[in-house]
Image (cartoon, grey):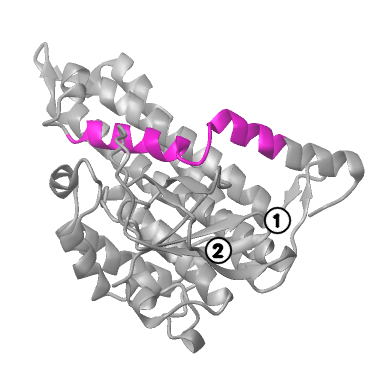
């Protein structure tokens, strides 16, 4: 297993790093608040083909795999892009798998999103891109359904994400049964993986912001980065960043194997975990912890300025916390992971 970037992935990273650097960033994120959607940047993104790049070329997409998409969304996270990129990419791949992805969805002119929680009382609640997506895919019982309606009313949140509830009235059934549920859960694990990659990007920039400020800010005639207390806040963050990135890359690798029909294992006895669902959960938890820790410490390095709207770190601080809880309480996600690992270990099953 080689988790280093390929030459093609390095090119993808460079292209999208340039794009997000020029078209998005903290100033654009501020202008997009409170909805959390930069329509101008989205229109520019359509020109790159990114919205449909995760769909097979035979279906009209760009043929990129999950590992490629993780490279793209890390850059989006690093530049705090106010774009529903993860939700659209994942949902587009899901629609393509069930034969319901049209040209407008592939092009991104119709934004689509995924309901990441089971519907309640006929409503998909707190859909991550529900306030901007025209179409939303949900799993209602054993039926995979598509809602095509105006975006929902934006739910205010500290992370300024485009959250909204979406009623399922009038939804079209795309598929039913075990295969439909399996396709949905595969997409949800892809969402976990790409959200983890977004959090890796946030962690990366939060670390850089903290280090840069510690070098520039002076007290008692010298940079505050020379003080041991400041150094201790930042010293272990590169390890958290690299660990989260590596685990997310392994989850993306396992996801590509799962799409190809290859099953993995989750054997904690032999410390062998290649099962996609398990790794996706681990990646989200790990990247969420890295992002919340890095943004918290970087904000404290900034002192009182860190809470000020003029300083960029507060944007990353809020976004990191919003993304880590939008699916569920991280503690419950950890318990879910424990159940997955320990149940299989106790019963002797793998994946």
In the picture as drawn, the residue positioned furthest to the left comes out as 221
Q: Which residues are magenta?
A: 312-338
Which mark identifies residue 152?
Answer: none
- Residue drawn at 48 percent across, 63 percent down: 170
Q: Is residue 337 magenta?
A: yes
Which mark identifies residue 274?
Answer: 1
In the picture as drawn, the residue positioned furthest to the right comes out as 347
Q: Nearer the viewer, residue 156 or 326?
A: 156
Quarter of the image for residue 319 reads top left
Residue 269 visible to an observer of this rendering: no
In the picture, the quarter occupied by the C terminus is bottom right
Give the SS element for disc 1: loop
Give the SS element for disc 2: strand
Where 62 sits versus 28, above or below? below
Q: Position of residue 108 (x, y in %)?
A: 32, 71
Q: Nearer the viewer, mark 2 or mark 1?
A: 2
Query: Would you call the spot at circle 1 few (<14 residues within 10 Å), some (14-19), or many (20 or more)?
Result: many
Residue under circle 2? 145
- Residue drawn at 29 percent across, 19 percent down: 230
Quarter of the image for residue 261 reads bottom right
Marks 2 and 1, the one that precedes in the sequence: 2
* 349 sits to left or right of 41: right
């Amino acid at each position: 297993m080689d988790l280093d970037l390929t030459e093609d992935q390095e090119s993808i990273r460079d292209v999208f790093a340039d794009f997000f650097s020029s078209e998005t960033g903290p100033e654009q994120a501020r202008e997009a608040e409170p909805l959390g959607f930069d329509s101008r940047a989205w229109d520019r993104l359509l020109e790159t083909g990114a919205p449909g790049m995760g769909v097979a070329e035979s279906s009209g997409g760009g043929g990129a795999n999950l590992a490629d998409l993780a490279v793209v969304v890390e850059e989006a996270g690093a530049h705090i892009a106010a774009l529903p990129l993860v939700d659209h990419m994942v949902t587009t791949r899901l629609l393509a798998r069930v034969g319901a992805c049209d040209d407008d969805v592939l092009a991104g002119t119709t934004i689509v999103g995924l309901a990441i929680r089971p519907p309640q009382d006929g409503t998909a609640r707190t859909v991550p891109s529900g306030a901007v997506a025209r179409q939303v895919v949900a799993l209602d019982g054993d039926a995979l359904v598509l809602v095509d309606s105006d975006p929902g009313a934006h739910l205010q949140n500290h992370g300024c994400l485009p959250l909204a509830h979406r009623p399922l009235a009038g939804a079209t059934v795309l598929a039913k049964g075990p295969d439909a549920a399996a396709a949905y859960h595969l997409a949800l694990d892809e969402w976990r993986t790409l959200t983890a990659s977004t959090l890796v990007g946030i962690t990366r920039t939060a670390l850089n912001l903290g280090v840069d400020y510690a070098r520039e800010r002076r007290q008692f005639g010298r940079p505050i980065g020379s003080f041991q207390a400041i150094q201790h806040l930042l010293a272990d963050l590169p390890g958290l960043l690299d660990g989260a990135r590596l685990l997310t890359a392994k989850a993306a690798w396992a996801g590509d194997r799962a799409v190809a029909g290859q099953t993995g294992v989750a054997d904690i006895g032999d410390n062998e975990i290649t099962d996609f669902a398990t790794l996706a959960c681990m990646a989200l938890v790990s990247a969420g912890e890295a992002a919340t820790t890095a943004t918290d410490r970087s904000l404290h390095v900034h002192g009182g300025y860190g809470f000020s709207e003029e300083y960029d770190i507060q944007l990353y601080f809020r976004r990191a916390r919003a993304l880590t809880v939008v699916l569920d309480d991280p503690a419950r996600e950890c318990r879910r992971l424990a159940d997955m690992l320990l149940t299989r270990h106790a019963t002797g099953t793998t994946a």
